[in-house]
Image (cartoon, grey):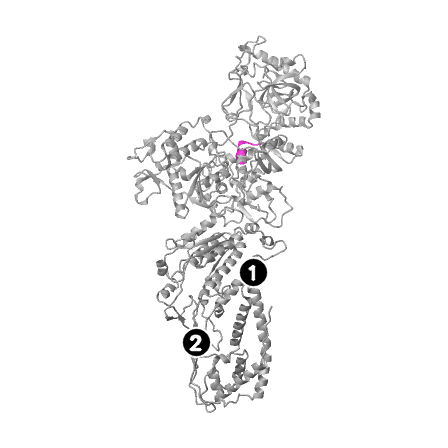
Amino acid sequence: VVIVVLFRDHNSKQRERNQYKQRKALLTTQSPPTVSLTVMAKYAYAPLQIDQNRRGNQGGSSGNNLSGMMMSSSNNNNSNIPSQADKDDGNDQLVQERMPMCVAICVLLAIVFVLSKGSGDIDLQAQQQLQQQQQHSLRSMDTPQVGATAATATTATTTASGHHSEVYPKPGMVQQQDLVDMNMVPEAAPDSLAAASTTTVNTATIETPPVASCPDCPTCPEPTTTTTTTTPNILDDPNALMAKLRQDALDSTPPHIIECSSAEAGESQDACHLPKSERYTALGQKGATLWMTGCSGAGKTTIATALEDLLVKHHGKHVYRLDGDNLRTGLNRDLTFTEADRAESVRRTGELATLFSDAGVITLVGLISPYRGDRDLVRKRHEDQGIPFYEIFLDVPIDELKARDPKGQYARVDSGELKHFTCIDDPYEEPLDPEITLKTHELKIEESAKILLQRLEKDGILMGPPKVTPPGLPNPDGDLLVDLLVSPTEAPSKQAEAATLPKVLLTDIDLNWLQTVAEGWAAPLTGFMREGILLETLHFNSLLVDPFNITGNGDKLTTKTKFEDFNPHRPNHRVSMPIPITLSLTEFTKDSIEQSGKQDVALVTRMGKMIAILRNVEIYENRKEEIVTRMFGAIDMGHPYIKNIYAGGDYLIGGEIELLERIVYNDGLDQWRKTVTELLQEFDDKGADTVYAFQTRNPTHAGHAYLMKSAGEDLKRQGYENPVLWLSPLGGWTKSDDVPLDVRVKQHEEVLKMGTDHPGGLDPASTVMAIWPAPMVYAGPTEVQFHAKSRRCAGASYFVVGRDPAGMKGSMEAVAHQDDDLYDGNHGRYVLQNSPGIEDMKMLSFVKVMYDVTDNVMKVPDESRMDDFISISGTKMRLLARNGAVPCSATDIPTDLVEANCIPSGFMVPDGWDLVVDYYKNIDNTTRWIPWSQPHVDPPAAEGTVSTGSFGFSTFAMQNVGSASFWHDIEYMPSAYKNTEKGIINMVTEIPMYMAAKMEVDKSSPGNPIIQDSNKDGSPRYYTYGTPFFNYGLIPQTWEDPDLKTGLFGGDNDPIDVMELGSTSLKMGSVTPCRVLGSMELIDEGEMDHKILCISLSDPDASRIHNMDDLEAVKPGYIAKIVHWWKYYKTSDGKDVNSLGSETPRTVDQALQVLEEVHHRWRSLCGLDGTRRTALSSHTDGFWLASQGCRA
């Protein structure tokens, strides 16, 4: 730091005294001589002397100029002129008083220069700034200036032609004149930095009053004119100087400040702040800057205000708007309109916007910001901080701007009142590659705002968490994509683990729900509901979640329910969850899990496939009545899904899912089954900027197509460029009288094939068809919320909803509304619009459409010509299809379609109509149709067998290729063991271990195949009590004769049953040598049904197990498990508990005695003991006995 000290030497003091003499002479004459102004300013303290004299004049003129001071002195008869001694003392005193202040100013100036100067000639600049600071200090002490009385000072600019013109400031500036005062630098007129550093010469000419006679002088001097010429530089313009100082300070400032000990110099300081991801997630939005640039009047403030209104009021977002007006009242109050100050304004605003946006505020900036480089620096600042930045160019022609002229500025420019006006005579550099260009002269204000809003939605700015879906599509609920399928590399080990876990049986409806959860349709669920989650669903139709652990509740959905230990902070986000997704189990399965001591279970389909693992399970009571009343709001025991709930077990099990393999149904429709991840990719491949979903429970006719196409056109009018239609047929369980899934899907295929060539067709280029996997539950307003929510999870922003969505008529068991709509037709749409957690998903409502006979198109009817429109209801369509209606004449459509038995040609695509007619004409042939998504899998068949029909359905049958009959042509006891071990029998496996499909040998059909057992109503029969933990089948060449009584009960008229108790699943139709261990006697509906217990000779434990005692020793608790099963296995079907002849199994010898008797009875049945067929009881009527081993 260089300290400059002012001092006076002897010579300077002498010169000062000479000056005094001259001044005294002037004051004693009437005509003072010309004064050289350069002398007056030679010493820094000389003006202080004059200032002291002026201030001593208490009664004189108050004029602030030299002439005024001299006149004042004269009028006071020189009373204020001191003696020489007083003068000397006064000078010394004044210097002593003023010197400390001058020194302090110099020290301060030196410090400023050292700190701010980055490079260059420091000594020269310090000297120049010292002079400038001294001169400004002198002015602040009321230094007299040459005013109008003495002379007139003017400012001029010399141009190349010698022409003189006034220099106008930038818009909004106050024009000033340069003043020359005793060689002191005047206040510069505000101008650009470039203008301040030109070679323009300022010339001040001052003429003194006429010279009076001078008797003391030998000759009187001639009147003189003293001209002072200066060449101004940056120091002559305070604004330019300030800009230069600012820039130097910025250039010398380190790019990063270390904000905390966790950060390092030159690196990001994010470690010192709350992470953006957490901040944004908690706020429910991301920060971003929308920088609107364009000429004055382009609409920056207007559009920003409209957007702010939308974001705050309609979306509840934190937004702040920055523009020139609110910034110049405070932050930018010190800035002018010079180029440098405009750049500084942009820089400051950019820094402020960066901070606002970093804090999670959507910041709207409206500045002309004419220079591209300045805007680019702001962009880079945002990019460096990882903050979204949108440059929005409001591109409006100048003529349009002049026509608007909201502030009258363009008129002032045209009149010449304003100069240097941006976009007119000052430059505006258009953005080269803005994010958005708005031609606001071609758009309404709300349209411009909507375009910006849609861009923010598309980029995920209006959501706090990271965006995980393609641009334009919403995040799934919980903001995480759910895909629970294990990787191919993990699958083998997971499958092996599943084999060791307790088994939980899945019904086909449960399998639909498993698919719904595992593929992400019910996000953020990752498993079947735990008790607490179920309670929130039932009572709030929604869940509070914290997937990013902002409030410490990140594991809320995946931990066991606690009813006493609550987190003091509630989760911060609510998502829609109106439908319970639960898995029921029986007491038998519950006990099996608890006795295993394991926390995980394997989920097994009715076909015996281990499809998933459920982790960290939670078992709780199945409060069926509470679930039904909260879910349906109706009492109807005939309601099909209510029946399903009451048929479930008395317990529910929750936990997290690991899907071991993809769920497929092999029904010819799997190409239309897409996971959420796959569907999002397809939407992205089509370039969708929004998706609208249309759910179908019926074939699609032209009225539906009209609504779908109209919705797409409406979305385009809203600003979307490529809305994609999702045709979404229901795929899960539906009630029996709904149109089957395969009929609907194949009809939809024809609609897409026809395209736009038919009024009932759809454009495949803008349509995606994908089956929705969840079951229908027919819960009206409650269920429709789930329909919308699950479509949102897969990328839809709009959902088309009609009258009475998800409703149905009450059954005859309903307390109210028997054979009438259970729910009001308008309630579903109303509830959906206002449901909690639905976020920003929007609903598109059905409108009534009718068939226009004038052009064969379905449309909204024209009220002025209603006679041209006919109504074709769903009921009428079904009747016409049953009657096989053919196309009507295109030019002569009858009023009564049913009577004419024709269908208008524009009502449905032709091939689609043929499919509908085929279905309704063959509706009773249920085996032809696929009503809903049920697995069609190959049976676990043994070698030497052949199958027909669909496994698990009533059409299934398995034959033994090697012999004519499973029942009659396979040996009762394998001959290889007859002489080596007693009690070895052959077992024919009908139901492999873990398989719930109830199979049995068909006694009536040729070859006695293994078929699917049926209930009394003809539906396939399944075990529902749990997964069978044994292999089940028959012993060939046996028959339990109804006439053979055991006590009061005769046989069940079937081959004798056998349970194989090993640890390995046997193949269906296999013949397995099995060691008899004992037997049980089941009394089932008045019949004695013996169950032989055995273990396969190939089982790993066979060598250790020879009887029931050995079984209990090797597998403790197994006998009790067997007894429990046979007593209670029918209770889950609503039947009574079975009775046992004894709860203690019979011994091996007792079992063998039973076997000998039933084998003997079979021999009689087949006539091998000479019994004639006519001698058999009526119980055997219809038996097929014509096999090689029986009565062939």
Q: Quadrant of the N terminus?
A: bottom right
| Quarter occupied by residue 126 | bottom right
Categorize mark 2 by other alpha carbons within 10 Å: few (<14), some (14-19), many (20+): many
The secondary structure type at the circle numbered 2 is strand
- The x and y percentages for residue 364 are 47, 56
Task: Please name which of the two marks, 1 or 2, marks the residue nearer to the observer.
Answer: 2
Q: CA distance from mark 1 to mark 2?
A: 41 Å
* Residue at the limit of the structure toward the bottom, as seen here: 215
- Magenta part of the chain: 505-513
Amino acid found under the numbered disc labelled 2:
Ala
- The x and y percentages for residue 1013 are 54, 23
Disc 1 or 2, which lies upstream in sequence? 2
* Cβ atoms at labels 1 and 2 below 8 Å apart: no
Categorize mark 1 by other alpha carbons within 10 Å: few (<14), some (14-19), many (20+): few
Left or right: residue 965 compared with residue 34: right
Amino acid found under the numbered disc labelled 1:
Thr
Res 1089 seen here: no
- The x and y percentages for residue 226 are 44, 79
In reply to whether residue 1182 is colored magenta, the answer given is no
1121 relative to 275, above or below: above
- The x and y percentages for residue 897 are 33, 33
Q: Across the whole image, how many numbered discs are drawn on residues?
A: 2
User: Which label sits on residue 204?
Assistant: 2
In reply to whether residue 508 is colored magenta, the answer given is yes
Q: Main secondary structure of the magenta part?
A: helix
User: Which label sits on residue 253?
Assistant: 1
